[in-house]
Image (cartoon, grey):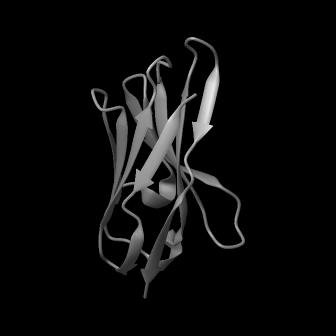
Amino acid sequence: QVQLVESGGGLVQAGGSLRLSCAASARVFRINSMAWYRQGPGKQRELVARIGGGSTNYADSVKGRFTISRDNAKNTVYLQMNSLKPEDTAVYYCNVGGTWPKLFDYWGQGTQVTVSS
């Protein structure tokens, strides 16, 4: 079992910044990839950014504004969000995955990010 604890969401004005954190407790599981997804009002959940295997990838809508990073020693993933826009308003979910000791995929409980215009 992997437990994920997210923090850092909140209310911010357009143009502002927020930093999300997600700490994973994974004593046995070896985490390969860590990612952030989001689900806006009336929208499907979408990938925001992923880090793993020495690479990162981002949704086109956040490139140049968001940065994903990872502290392997702490099993923590961060999402630095700059130049926030009202359309970034969503519940943001942390996701981790790997293959050892078995294939696994876990989700956090979500943290609300609201960007006011």
Q: Nearer the viewer, residue 45 or 8?
A: 8
Relative to 70, does residue 8 appear above or below in the rendering? Answer: below
Q: Nearer the viewer, residue 113 or 48?
A: 113
Find residue 42 and report its horizontal and vertical position in percent.
Answer: 72, 72
Find residue 15 and report its horizontal and vertical position in percent.
Answer: 31, 77
| Left or right: 13, with 100 as reference point | left
Task: Classify residue 80 by image quadrant.
Answer: bottom left
Find residue 23 and report its horizontal and vertical position in percent.
Answer: 39, 41
Find residue 44 and report its horizontal and vertical position in percent.
Answer: 71, 59
| Left or right: 50, with 68 as reference point | right
**Name of the residue lying farthest toward the bottom:** 117
Q: Residue at x 30, y 75 (%)?
A: 16
* Number of dots carrying numbers: 0
Name the image quarter holding the N terminus: top right
Q: Nearer the viewer, residue 64 or 13?
A: 13
Q: Residue at x 30, y 32 (%)?
A: 74
**Name of the residue lying farthest toward the top:** 101
Q: Residue at x 70, y 66 (%)?
A: 43
Relative to 3, does residue 104 appear above or below in the rendering? Answer: above
Task: Classify residue 90 by image quadrant.
Answer: bottom right
Task: Classify residue 82 by image quadrant.
Answer: bottom left
| Left or right: 24, with 46 as reference point | left
Q: Residue at x 43, y 88 (%)?
A: 117
